[in-house]
Image: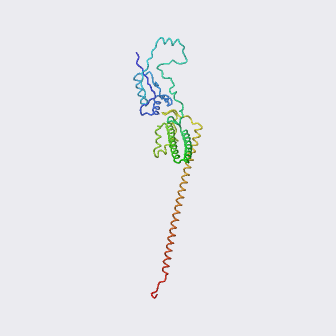
Amino acid sequence: MSDNRFKIVFDGALLPGVESTTAKLNLAELFKSDVEAIEKLFTGRPVALKRDLSRSDAETYLTALKNAGVDARIESEQPVAFSLAEAHETDSGASDLSRPAASPYAPPRAAVGDDLPEFATLNAFTIHGRIGRLRYLAWTLVLTVALLVASGIIATASFAVATASPTAGVILGSLLGFALFVALVWVSVQIGVQRLHDLGWSGWLYLLNLVPFVNSIFPLLLLVLPGNTGANQYGAPPPRNSTAVKVLASLWLAFIPLMLIIVLALGMNGYLDQLEANVDSSYESSSINADDDTDQSVIVEEEDTQSADEAAEPVDSPEQ
C-alpha cells in the first residue's frame, strides 16, 4: 500500500499586499530561474509547480511559496490505475518511438505563458495597457493638434450663429467648449494612466496632477523615466516605436521650446506695454501739475496787478 502523493498548484494569485513584481523576483530566486521564465506562470491557468510530494514535503514547499508572496495550494495527485488490457493494447498499437513516454508524475510540458503576447495591443481610448515615452509624446501632440482644430471649428460655428442671434451663439459655444474640455481630460487621463503602467506604477498616481507644486514636476517624470523592459503586472511591454512615432515625438520636443519662446515674448511685450503705460501716466501727471502751477502763477500776478492798481488810485485831499 503506497502513501498518498500531493502536488503544489499555482494559478497566478498573490497574497494580499504583495506586488506582482516582488512576487516574481522572489519566485525567480526560489527556483533559481530568471524573471522572464517566471512571468509565464502568471497566466491565470492552474500550473503544477511540484509533483509527487509527500504531505510533509508539500507543506514545506507551500510555506516557502507563501513566504515568496504567492497564494499556492496543495492538491492530491490523482491515482493512476493500470490494467493488463490497456497495457496489451498499448504494446500492440503503433507507438511513436521518437517521443518519450508520458509519466503521470512528470512536470508539465505545456508551454505555460503562450497566451501572453510579446507586445501589448495599442489603444488610446482605454486605461489598460502600456505606452512608452516617445509614444506618450506622439499621442499628446496628436491630441493637442486635434484640440486646436476642434477649438477653431467651435469658434467659427459660434461666430456664425452669433451673427444671427448673439445669445444662441454664446450658448452653442459654451456647450461645445465644455464637451471639448471633457473629451480632452478623458483622453489625457487614459494616455497618462497607460504611461504610468509602463513604469509599473498605479494609474491612481495620475491624481498627483491636481496637487499644487507637484503638478509642475510630475509630468516631467512621465517624459523622462524609462518604462519596464519586460512584462509587468499591467501586461506585456508596448510595441517598438515606429517611424511615425519618432517623427511626432521629435516635433513635440521641438514644439516645447517654441512655446516657451512664444510665452516669454508675450510676457516681455506685456511688460513693455505696462512700462510704456506707466511712463505715459507719469508724463500726463507732470503736465497736469505744470498747468496747475501756471494757473496759480497767473492768478497771483492778477492779484498783484489788482493790488498795484488800487494803490495807484488818487486819494482825495482834505481840502477837496
Q: Nearer the viewer, residue 311 or 32?
A: 311
| Furthest residue toward bottom | 319
Give the number of callouts: 0
Give the colour scheme shown.
rainbow
Q: Position of residue 239 (x, y in %)?
A: 55, 34
- Up/down of 102 relative to 268, above or below: above
Q: Position of residue 312 (x, y in %)?
A: 49, 81
Q: Is residue 8 left or right of residue 133?
A: left
Q: Nearer the viewer, residue 159 or 101?
A: 159
- Up/down of 253 relative to 280, above or below: above
Q: Nearer the viewer, residue 68 or 158?
A: 158
| Furthest residue toward front | 164
- Among the 4 quarters of the image, the one containing residue 17: top left
Q: Position of residue 104 (x, y in %)?
A: 47, 19
Q: Position of residue 241 (x, y in %)?
A: 57, 36
Q: Which image quarter is the N terminus in? A: top left
